[in-house]
Image: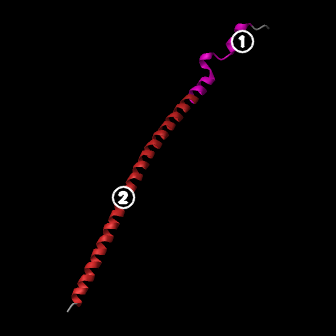
């Protein structure tokens, strides 16, 4: 029995139904999903970086305010101590 060349083509899967097409489509959609997730992560990193910078600036401002309040508190305490000393000296004066 002799096979013709046309008979061989009939046993081959037609190119429209290539099983690798579905694998390629799956891989392509997987890559698209991965690319989208990477892009989301990049955006998240950028947002967190900006937020981190803002928080650092806020911390510096709060530290400066804290130092100012500490200095004011020390000045007030010094003035009060001076007044207390004066009052005690007035009480002891004849």
Q: Nearer the viewer, mark 2 or mark 1?
A: 2
Looking at the image, residue 38 lies above or below residue 91:
above
Q: Position of residue 55 (x, y in %)?
A: 40, 52
Looking at the image, residue 44 lies above or below residue 91:
above
Q: Position of residue 42 (x, y in %)?
A: 49, 39
Q: Which residue occupies 45% across, 39% down?
A: 43
| Quadrant assignment, res 30 | top right
Label 2 environment density (alpha carbons within 10 Å; few <14, some 14–19, many ≥20): few
Disc count in the image? 2
- Per the image, label 2 sits on a secondary structure element best described as helix
Q: Position of residue 49 (x, y in %)?
A: 45, 45
Spatial CA span between label 2 and label 1 = 82 Å
Name the quadrant of the C terminus. Answer: bottom left
CB contact under 8 Å: marks 2 and 1: no
Q: Which residue occupies 45% across, 42% down?
A: 46
Residue for badge 2 = 62
The residue stretch that appears in magenta: 4-26
Question: Which of the two labelled residues, at mark 2 and mark 1, occupies the earlier sequence position?
Answer: 1
Residue for badge 1 = 8
Question: Position of 81 compared to 51: left or right?
Answer: left
Q: Which residue occupies 39% across, 49% down?
A: 54
Between 18 and 43, the one nearer to me in the picture: 43
- Per the image, label 1 sits on a secondary structure element best described as helix
- As drawn, the residue found furthest toward the bottom would be 94
Magenta run includes residue 20: yes
Question: Position of 89 compared to 58: left or right?
Answer: left
Q: Name the magenta segment's main secondary structure.
A: helix
Magenta run includes residue 22: yes
Question: Position of 94 compared to 45: left or right?
Answer: left
């Amino acid at each position: 029995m002799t096979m013709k060349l046309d008979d061989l083509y009939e046993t081959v899967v037609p190119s429209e139904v290539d099983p690798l097409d579905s694998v390629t489509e799956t891989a392509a959609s997987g890559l698209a999903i991965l690319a989208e997730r990477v892009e989301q992560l990049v955006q998240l990193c950028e947002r967190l970086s900006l937020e981190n910078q803002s928080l650092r600036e806020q911390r510096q401002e709060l530290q400066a305010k804290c130092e100012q309040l500490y200095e004011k508190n020390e000045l007030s305490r010094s003035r009060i101590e001076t007044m207390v000393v004066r009052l005690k000296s007035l009480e002891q004066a004849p």
